[in-house]
Image: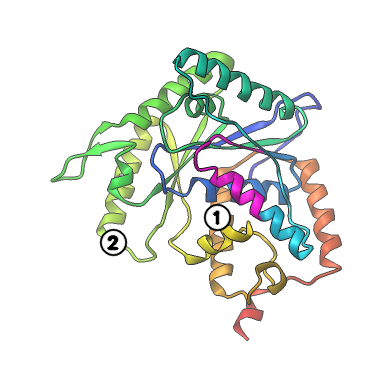
Amino acid sequence: MLVQPNKGPNRSAYVVVVGNEKGGSGKSTTAIHVAIALLKAGQRVATIDLDARQKSFTHYIENRRSWARRNRLDLEIPTHFYVDRVEGIRADENEAAEFSSFSRTIAMIEHSHDFVVVDTPGTDAYLMRLAHAMADTLITPLNDSFVDFDVLGTVDPQTYALTGISHYAEMVREARRQRRKVDQEDTDWIVVRNRLSTLGSRNKRLIAEGLNDLGLQLGFRCAEGFAERVIYREFFPRGLTALDSINESTLGTRPNMSHVTAREEVQRLLAALRLPIDEKGLRRAAARSEWFASLDKPLEIHDLLD
């Protein structure tokens, strides 16, 4: 991850938004892994859940807090908030109320934290568009199929050549335009390909070609995300991530090679995001890791192969 110098005590938190209008793309899983990775790098992290109906991100963090308390584990936990959607009769009053609630939340944390990680709902709503417009980094998880590709672009059914830009991509383009008007800064947009097949296939190649063409038009980068692994679903009830210490007391079961592979997968994604980690935070994290290493030797790959 890119390391940048601290910009001073009054700098605003760096905002990472995880968004996609299609559900089931791995937004909450991606958001929790980014948040915990930043905490492990010594950063001060706040998280916001805008999906008032599902609250998957909120439940993930609550599960993590509960598992840590139950097993007396020292798990990193972000400062967490969720913002409810307002569903009154008048749309303008709803949006004004949602804007006020979101603004109050941001005001409480923007100068006391280094990063804010925002998980958005899988529908086009006012709060979702508002979050996209304030993103410094936008992460769009996308299942590696043309069903999910459709939220970004359309293709010719015979040649699979790119033929147009879809609704979500248009919304992001407008959000980035609004962001530039406010502070002349551009959002770093990364499309993350999830549920990747470990084998090469025609579909995998065609998706890659389509995203490459679309990225040139829309100005996003592509990164490989998470493969289809049962372990990611097993993490949720305990609020764990692939980055947590691999041992039986943490996981509640003997770790295996799937845990190691998942961790390497997550680390590759985090490197690809190039988030601006503060050097002071890295020094805090190094000191903390050194202290914990003296108490508990982590499980290495060769331990799993014995």
Whether the magenta-drawn stretch holds residue 233 is answered as no
Please name the colour scheme applied to the rendered image. Answer: rainbow
Q: Secondary structure at mark 1?
A: helix
Q: Position of 252 compared to 293: left or right?
A: left
Residue 134 vs residue 302, the one in the foreground = 134
Q: Which residue is mark 2?
A: 201
* Residue 237, label in figure: none
- Which stretch appears magenta? 47-63
Q: Is residue 198 above or below residue 32?
A: below
- Residue extending farthest bottom: 306
Q: Position of 130 compared to 216: left or right?
A: right
Q: Is residue 11 above or below residue 68?
A: above
Where is residue 182? Give x, y as percent.
56, 14
Mark with earlier residue (1, 2): 2
Residue type, numbered disc 1:
Arg
Whether the magenta-drawn stretch holds residue 62 is answered as yes
Q: Which residue is mark 1?
A: 268
Residue type, numbered disc 2:
Ser
Residue 196 vs residue 208, the one in the foreground = 196
Q: Residue at x 67, y 26 (%)?
A: 106
Residue 182 in sight: yes
Residue 299 in sight: no
Q: Secondary structure at mark 2?
A: loop
Where is residue 166? Give x, y as percent.
30, 32
Where is residue 26? Give x, y as percent.
47, 49
Q: Is residue 16 above or below residue 303?
A: above
